[in-house]
Image: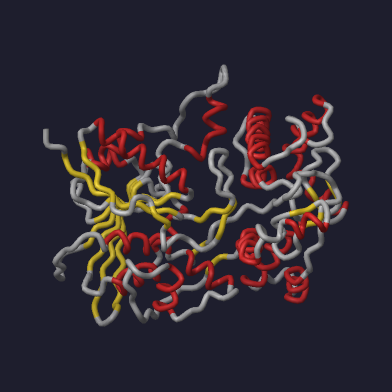
Amino acid sequence: KMTTFNFPLGLSLECYVCAKNKAHALQAIQSAAKNSTPVENKKLVEKEFVTPEVVCKGCKVQRYCSLAHLLEDRPEHMDLCRVLSHLLRSQKLKHPFLHLGNISSPEQLQMVISQLKLILRVKLQRPLTPREHQVISNPAICEVCFKTGALLKVCKECAGVAYCCEDHCYQDAKKHTPKECRTLALISSPFRQLDCTLNLRSFHQSVDMRQSHLIDAFFKATTLKIDNNPQNIAACSSFSGIASACLALTNISWVSDQYSAVIVYVLAATEEQMRYFQEMHLRFFFLQYQSIQNLDLYFIGPKLLPRESSKKKIFRFRGLLRTVAMHYFSETFTTFSQIMKVDPTVILLLEPDFINMGMATEQLVNQLPGKRKGGAEDFNWQSCLGAILRTYGVPICYTSATRLQAMADFTAFRSVALFHNVTIERVYNITENPYREILPLYNFSDWHNERIIYANNYLEVVFTSKNRI
C-alpha cells in the first residue's frame, strides 16, 4: 500500500469542514467502512461546490458554507483565530491582510503574507500547521484588485481563485486559463486524501529515459491512462523518484553481469520518500534496465525512523530473478561515510534544501532575543555535502521543488566544492525534470515566486573530481 502526498486541507477559499467531510467520505468508500452507508458518502462526494459566504468574525480569514460548520470547526481553528483577532483589535484593522495598508501588487501581497506568518509563528510559539500555512498563503482576495471582503465569488471549477465582481473575473480570463483551473482543482481535490491501493505487477514497454517524460513512461510501462482517474494520477506521480534515478543512470555506462549490483544511495532520506520505492517502482526500474538483476538501495538520513537495518526482496521479472537489498541508516552521510565503505553507482537527493530556504520564517524566529538557535535536528550540512562531493566520478542527482531552490542548492554545492578543492561538472544546468510529480502543490515558501509547484520539479546531475594543483 502506498500513500499519496497528504495535502493540507484548509483553503480559505472553500469551507474547511465541507472539504474535510468529502475527504472522509472518499476514505470511507475506499475502505468500505461499516459505520456509514455508501449512499451518504456518495452524496457528500458529489455535493456541488458552494461559495463559502459565512466569514469567521474573529479572524476575518476563514470561511464556511454555514454557521453550523463554523461552530464545528471552532476547536481546530481557535489558535489562529485568537492571534489574528488580537491583531485586528490592537491595530484597529478591518482585515488582517490590511496591516500594511491597502494591497496594490502581488509583491506587496507576498510581503503581507510573509509578515503574517512571522507574527503567527511568534505569537503561537510553535511552527504553523499545514492548514495554517494554506489559509495564510492562499487568502480569499480578489485576483485583480486584491480586495478582501465577504462578497468575493470563488471559481466553482477549482476553488482556487476569487473575484470581487464579474468584470474582474472576465479580466483575469487570460491568466486563469482552463489549464490553470484544472491544475488548481487538483490541488484542492479531496481525492488527494486517498491512499493509492494500486500494486502494479504487470509492466510492458520501456522508454528512452532521455527522450520521454513521466506520463508517457508510466503509460507505456503500465498501459494505464491518466485522464481524470485519481488513483492512476496518484500512482503515476509516485513513480517520480525511481524515474529520476533511472534518468540519472543514463549518464554513466557500465558492464553488467549477474553478480554485480547497481548501488543507489538515497541521501537525506525521509519516511515520506519511502513511497517512491515500493515493489511496483522497483519493477519499473528493472523494466528500464533489463540486464540488471541486483539492486542495492541505501536509505541514509537522520529523519528516518528506527527499523530493521536491512531487508531483501526477491521476485521474478521478465524471466529473471531480481534481488533488491534495502538498507536503512538513521544518520547523516558524514557519519555513514566514516564507518562504511562508500561505493555507490549513483547518489540521489530528493529536494535536499541544503540551506533551509523553506524554513525562512523559522530562521527569522530563531534570531529573536531569547529564542533557541539550533536543536536536535540541526546538523552540519557543509560537512555532509563535503562527504558527498568526495564520491568522485559518481553521478549525484538532486531535485528541487522551485527554480530558486534549485539555484540555492547548486550554490551550496559550489561553495563547499571550492572549500574542498573539488571540481564540479554539471550535466543539465538545472532543467525542468521530465519525471517530476504530476500532482501540483501550493508553494508556501516566503522566498519563492512560483505559485504552483511540483515535487522533484527541477533536476540537476553533477559529477565531481579532485582539483589538480
Seen from this angle, which residue lies furthest left?
469
Give 420 or 163, whichever is nearer the viewer.
163
The quadrant of the picture occupied by the C terminus is top left
Q: How is the image coloured?
A: secondary structure
Q: Is residue 233 left or right of residue 305?
A: right
Total count of labels? 0
Q: In this view, does 10 lie to the left or right of 261?
A: right
Q: Picture quarter containing residue 260?
A: bottom left
Above-or-below relation of 6 to 61: below
Question: Residue 220's spot in the image, x, y percent?
Answer: 40, 78
Question: Residue 288's spot in the image, x, y percent?
Answer: 30, 72
Give 392 or 203, whichever is nearer the viewer.
392
Q: Which residue is drawn at 21% across and 73% down?
A: 291
Q: Which residue is drawn at 49% across and 69% down?
A: 235
Seen from this angle, which residue lies furthest top?
369
Above-or-below relation of 176 to 303: below
Q: Picture quarter containing residue 155?
A: bottom right
Question: Residue 414's spot in the image, x, y percent?
Answer: 30, 38
Q: Which residue is drawn at 35% across and 69% down?
A: 211
Above-or-below relation of 79 to 48: above
Q: Residue at x 77, y 35 (%)?
A: 102
Q: Picture quarter containing residue 418?
A: top left
Give 357 or 166, whichever is nearer the viewer.
166
Question: Residue 160's spot in the image, x, y percent?
Answer: 69, 56
